[in-house]
Image (spheres, rainbow, N blue to C red):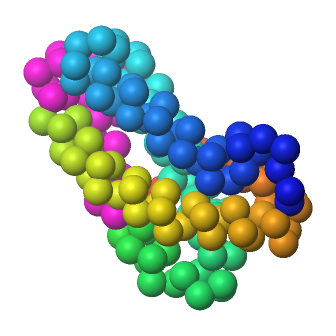
């Protein structure tokens, strides 16, 4: 896949999702985003984890990146518990004080996790897209099935 714009590349597509997720979670902590914005960021994070585990990781693991993929899955599992806790708190209309600690924990995990994906896995995804023109479409078309949980949750 020779892209005419960076947004057409898997790495850029997934990194853009990282930025949107960060904006919702960090914005909530900073008081510049609502609980609804936090809930939307959490929904995007769930969908993002799904597309990585269902579409991105299998070909990268087959291409020799099994260990980095395993580490990312393990970190997804650590985040998943916080995502579920925060999503439930948002649905219950808990106060910002009830959400602060798990949001801070999630930000800490994301700050450790995302740079590894962006420097190791996303460049590999871009290379894979060069060999498989349908790959970017599969990433963009993936949708989170109801009740789906990440593999190591």
- Residue 2 rendering spot, x and y as whole percentages: 86, 56
Span colored in magenta: 75-100
Judged left or right of residue 62, residue 22 is left
Instruction: Give the position of the N terminus as an image quadrant.
Output: bottom right
- Whether residue 11 is visible here, answered yes or no, is yes
Please name the residue shown 54% across and 67% down the image.
121
**Image height of 47 relative to 89, above or below:** below
- Residue 56 rendering spot, x and y as whole percentages: 64, 64
Judged left or right of residue 78, residue 130 is right
Please name the residue shown 26% across and 42% down the image.
107
- Residue 133 rendering spot, x and y as whole percentages: 88, 61
**Image height of 140 relative to 116, above or below:** above
Q: Is residue 35 magenta?
A: no
Decide which of 137, 36 is in the foreground and name it: 137
- Whether residue 90 is visible here, answered yes or no, is no
**Image height of 7 relative to 40, above or below:** below
Residue 97, by quadrant, is top left
Residue 16, by quadrant, is top right
Instruction: Give the position of the C terminus as an image quadrant.
Output: bottom left
Please name the residue shown 57% across and 54% down the image.
50
Decide which of 102, 110 is in the foreground and name it: 110
């Amino acid at each position: 896949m020779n892209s005419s714009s960076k947004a057409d590349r898997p790495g850029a597509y997934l990194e853009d999702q990282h930025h949107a997720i960060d904006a919702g979670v960090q914005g909530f902590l900073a008081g510049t985003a609502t609980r609804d914005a936090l809930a939307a960021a959490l929904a995007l994070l769930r969908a993002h984890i799904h597309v990585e585990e269902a579409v991105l990781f299998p070909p990268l693991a087959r291409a020799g990146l099994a260990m980095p993929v395993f580490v990312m899955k393990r970190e997804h599992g650590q985040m998943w518990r916080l995502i579920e806790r925060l999503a439930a708190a948002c649905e219950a209309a808990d106060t910002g004080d009830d959400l602060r600690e798990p949001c801070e924990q999630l930000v800490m995990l994301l700050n450790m996790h995302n740079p590894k994906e962006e420097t190791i896995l996303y460049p590999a995804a871009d290379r894979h897209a060069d060999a498989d023109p349908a790959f970017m479409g599969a990433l963009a078309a993936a949708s989170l099935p109801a009740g789906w949980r990440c593999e190591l949750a």
